[in-house]
Image (spheres, coloured by chain):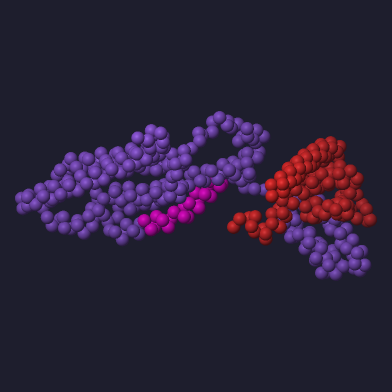
Chain colours: A purple, B red
């Protein structure tokens, strides 16, 4: 076998490995004829037989076998340009929910830990498992859209075509500058952690009292039963905030979002007001308790809650003013 | 960095735009050249001789695609003691080529009009600024 046919045959064999059996022989025969003609021309130009190096240069110029073969195949893509924007949108919209659900699922065992190191280890473990689970989530979405792409390309009616209606586009969004999407996602994650923390408190008072838990045990006092009502109110607020934060993930920060924030603050004020009206925060559990000192402690705790109520009220009024102010217009603000 | 302030990126942008511009033109050229019968290598040489060089790895698969679209017909025939696949424009290919050439001329006329208008506008602008100064 001469060097020309040897190198050329090896080159064609390498291309053939990447071609489908149905067209392989035909494509290779055509390529052989074209390349052979090119080599013949080249030999004529040089006025001598071609060396291995000459042939190798021509074949190298023609391209890598796998790349050459790929050009004879139909254009392939896992998710084509018609489906890709929907794929990207789904990933973007679903990712925050996936993060929260996966994280909460891994965090659920935190509720049953008894010590602070266990709590920290549980949170770190949940964070560590988040990335592999998110990759798996993305893989499932990709697989679903790859199937969608196959169905789409084999469906002559082509959905996603001209079926959209411009008149159904959302209204122009308010220009109020809100938090970035990343910030809203982190906000939601921290809020979920905060809920878990609050849920774990009844079983693990050290989470809120710290070493004070042991000090409290040394005295014949305990928390008043009214705290249970407060705890339920707190969970209602946290649940409401969770819903607003989830809604905020996929909506731009607009006036509705500001109103929701204000409603949440209003719930907070109502809860603080309830704390103020409680008046008794700690109760005696035995005859040895110093009742005068207990009354004094209850008074000062109540005083502290009054200050908190005042601060939350001022904060609410300021935020409400910020909301109302743009709609009043410049003229109505001239006195 | 602003793209316009980076001269090193200009050749890349030009190459990319040139490739886009040539892609459609090459198909018209190949169809037109195949009014006469050619096999792959001689077609490539004929196009290159007329100033339209095209890579083998682009041309040969393109010929097969155009044949699948029934714009070309092909037949294996022996020439110089070698079997070669000869391509020729089909009747449907002739119709499509006529339509493409009409489109080509229309685009060409439009671009020329735009260029003439923009030249006239820039001349007016420069003469006004000269008068002002």
In the picture provided, is A181 more to the left or to the right than B41?
A: left
Residue A85 in view in this figure: yes
Q: Residue at x 61, y 46 (%)?
A: A79
Q: Main secondary structure of the magenta part?
A: helix
Q: Say whether residue B69 is visible.
A: no
**Residue A105: image location, x then y, percent:** 39, 49
Q: Position of residue B90 (x, y in %)?
A: 86, 40
Relative to residue A247, is residue A47 depicted above or below?
Answer: below
Using the image as rendered, state which of residue A324 and residue A166 is in the foreground: A324
Horizontal side of A135 relative to B76 (left or right) equals left
Query: At x 22% / y 40%, what residue is drawn?
Result: A273
The one nearer the camera, B132 or A124, is B132
Residue at image position (39%, 57%) is A125
Q: Is residue A31 above or below residue A82?
A: below
**Is residue A126 on the magenta stretch?**
yes
Residue A253 falls left or right of residue A142: left
Boundaries of the magenta span: A123-144
Percent position (x, y) of residue B114?
75, 41
Q: Nearer the viewer, residue A210 or A5?
A: A210
Say whether residue A21 is left or right of residue A33. left
Q: Indicate whether residue A136 is drawn in magenta.
A: yes
Q: Position of residue A333 (x, y in %)?
A: 37, 36
Looking at the rendered image, the quarter that the N terminus of chain B falls into is bottom right
* Residue found at the far left of this picture: A287
Q: How many marks?
A: 0
Taking the spot 63% from the left edge, 44% from the top edge, the residue there is A81
């Amino acid at each position: 076998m001469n060097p020309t046919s040897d190198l050329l045959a090896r080159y064609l064999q390498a291309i053939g490995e990447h071609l489908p059996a149905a067209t392989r022989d035909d494509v290779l025969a055509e390529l052989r004829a074209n390349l052979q003609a090119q080599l013949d021309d080249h030999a004529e130009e040089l006025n001598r037989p071609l060396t291995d190096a000459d042939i190798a240069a021509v074949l190298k110029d023609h391209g890598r076998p796998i790349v050459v073969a790929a050009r004879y195949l139909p254009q392939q893509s896992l998710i084509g340009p018609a489906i890709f924007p929907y794929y990207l949108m789904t990933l973007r919209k679903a990712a925050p929910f996936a993060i929260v659900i996966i994280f909460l699922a891994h965090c659920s065992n935190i509720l049953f830990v008894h010590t602070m190191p266990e709590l920290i280890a549980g949170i770190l473990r949940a964070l560590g498992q988040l990335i592999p689970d998110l990759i798996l989530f993305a893989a499932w979405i990709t697989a679903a859209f790859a199937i969608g792409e196959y169905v789409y390309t084999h469906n002559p009616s082509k959905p996603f075509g001209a079926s959209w209606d411009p008149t159904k586009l959302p209204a122009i969004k308010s220009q109020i500058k809100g938090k970035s999407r990343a910030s809203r996602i982190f906000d939601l994650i921290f809020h979920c952690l905060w809920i878990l923390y609050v849920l774990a408190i009844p079983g693990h008072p050290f989470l809120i009292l710290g070493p004070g838990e042991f000090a409290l045990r040394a005295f014949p006092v305990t928390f008043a039963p009214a705290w249970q009502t407060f705890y339920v109110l707190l969970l209602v607020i946290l649940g409401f905030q969770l819903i607003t934060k989830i809604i905020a993930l996929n909506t731009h920060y607009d006036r509705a979002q500001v109103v929701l924030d204000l409603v949440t603050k209003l719930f907070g004020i109502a809860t603080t007001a309830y704390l103020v009206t409680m008046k008794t925060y700690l109760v005696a559990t035995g005859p040895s308790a110093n009742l005068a000192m207990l009354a004094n402690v209850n008074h000062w705790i109540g005083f502290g809650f009054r200050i908190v109520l005042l601060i939350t009220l001022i904060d609410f009024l300021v935020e409400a003013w910020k909301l109302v102010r743009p709609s009043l217009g410049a003229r109505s603000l001239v006195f | 960095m602003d793209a316009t302030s980076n001269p090193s990126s200009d050749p890349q942008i030009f190459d990319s735009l040139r490739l886009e511009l040539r892609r459609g033109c090459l198909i018209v050229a190949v169809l037109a050249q195949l009014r006469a019968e050619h096999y792959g290598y001689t077609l490539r040489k004929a196009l290159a001789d007329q100033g339209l060089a095209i890579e083998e790895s682009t041309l040969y698969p393109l010929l097969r695609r155009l044949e699948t679209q029934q714009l070309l017909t092909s037949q294996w025939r022996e020439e110089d003691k070698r079997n070669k696949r000869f391509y020729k424009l089909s009747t449907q290919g002739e119709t499509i080529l006529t339509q493409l050439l009409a489109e080509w001329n229309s685009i060409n006329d439009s671009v020329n009009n735009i260029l003439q208008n923009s030249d006239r506008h820039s001349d007016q602008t420069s003469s006004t600024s000269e008068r002002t100064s």
